[in-house]
Image: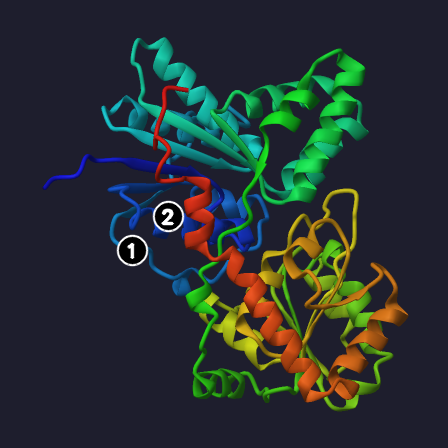
Amino acid sequence: MTHPRRRLVIVVRADPVICGHSGEARNLAEVALTRGFTDVRLLTWPIPALRAAGLPLKPLDRLLPYSAGITVERPEAVGDYRVPDGRHQAGLTGRLVELLAEPLPTTCLSMYLVPHTTVVMDAVAATRAAGITPNVHTVAKAVGSDVTNVIRSCLREGRFGAATVLFTTFLANDEVVAVSEYTREEIVASAEQVDAHCGTAFAERCRRRVTVSYPPIDSAAFLDLDPAHVDAALARRGLERDGYILFLSRVTRAKGIDDLLTAFGRMRCRSRVKLVVAGTGPMLEQVRAMAADDDRVVFLTDVDDHEKALLMRGCAAYALPTKPEPDFVETFGIALAEKMLAGGGPIITTMTGGTLEAVGDTAVIVEAGDVAALAAAVDRAVLDMSAAERQDLELRARARAMAFDRVAVFDALFPQEAPAVGVG
């Protein structure tokens, strides 16, 4: 029996960008192959464009391969230097028009409203204006920085026209989702501010239509890790099991890395454990300078997706003291959920944004920005917490994080009983 062909297109900042949402795209794409989609495409940016943007990138020679049936497309820019901006966006939009023009039922998911949802809506509009009726169903997923960076900056700077365009584009999709309940609430609150200024009615529509779809995680990559593989990975880095506190995230102020470094200097446990800072980001050089005289701080800037789980499993504690900043608030915390699956030492984090939606009551919570409390919490986790308490936190964390498994998230986002595609 021949099954009808179906296509899923995800417009996103995909690998090699170091971002939890690039992992989301990969996980949704992989599950799609098991759910009747015969052609899955990630529409993303050329590597030089990602480098030019200053985004933190994974080592190109160690990217995990995608399964057969998943195609990563990086359309080249349209035009030359006389088009100072938008050339790559035009390339993405044009390529999507070509895909939509093919007589193939297509579900199109955009992650990051700016510019990916704009790409999708422009492509759909252009295809229809050309006299072609695409069989497409569009889903727009608002991730953290859509709200904490783009929307908030519009409101902070009084740029209500830009905010109006953003909400109009978002709500033009067949389905609109948010990465967490916190993100959904922030979308509605921001829409209320735009409504109050412009006389629009975005908030009611957002309140009625926006649903929550948590980040999908490949739980199999974090569960049942071979102890020998963990020990071997640590040995290659000069580390020992339970011999380090792990910070594995983007190295940026909003992730609380400056607070963690300061706290580490005050910890009683520093004579027993090292601090491993795994990742890259805009504060990397500043953080290196802060730790220049501390031989107990180790920097790892080339950790790949495979090694990430092993480092998480072997640590004495995992600290992500994220805090709200004008340009970013942690709206879920994908790395927290990954650590919950991997096991290992307790998680120490804050109540910033949507982190509690990830960890629930399975982590040690401190006040964001409270360096003394952070130092005390890590000391308790490493030095004073009993083996039974550590195991209880680990088991409950893993059970909670299974709700974010990529299969469960995919099936909730694209339910099989519902039509896979529509007409927009």
N-terminal of the pair, mark 2 or mark 1, is 2
Residue 67 is marked as 1
Percent coordinates x, y for residue 309 in the rendering = 51, 72
Type of residue at label 2? Ala
Task: Quadrant for residue 396, please give it.
Answer: bottom right
Percent coordinates x, y for residue 139 in the rendering = 47, 32
Q: Is residue 166 placed above or below 48 in the rendered structure? A: above
Type of residue at label 1? Ser
**209 or 130, which is in the foreground?**
209
Q: Is residue 40 placed above or below 231 in the rendered structure? A: above
Which quadrant of the figure contains the N terminus? top left
Residue 29 is marked as 2
Which quadrant of the figure contains the C terminus? top left
User: How busy is the neighbourhood of tag 1: few (under 14 within 10 Å), some, or many (20 plus)?
Assistant: few
Local secondary structure at mark 2: helix
Q: Are marks 2 and 1 in contact (CB under 8 Å)?
A: no
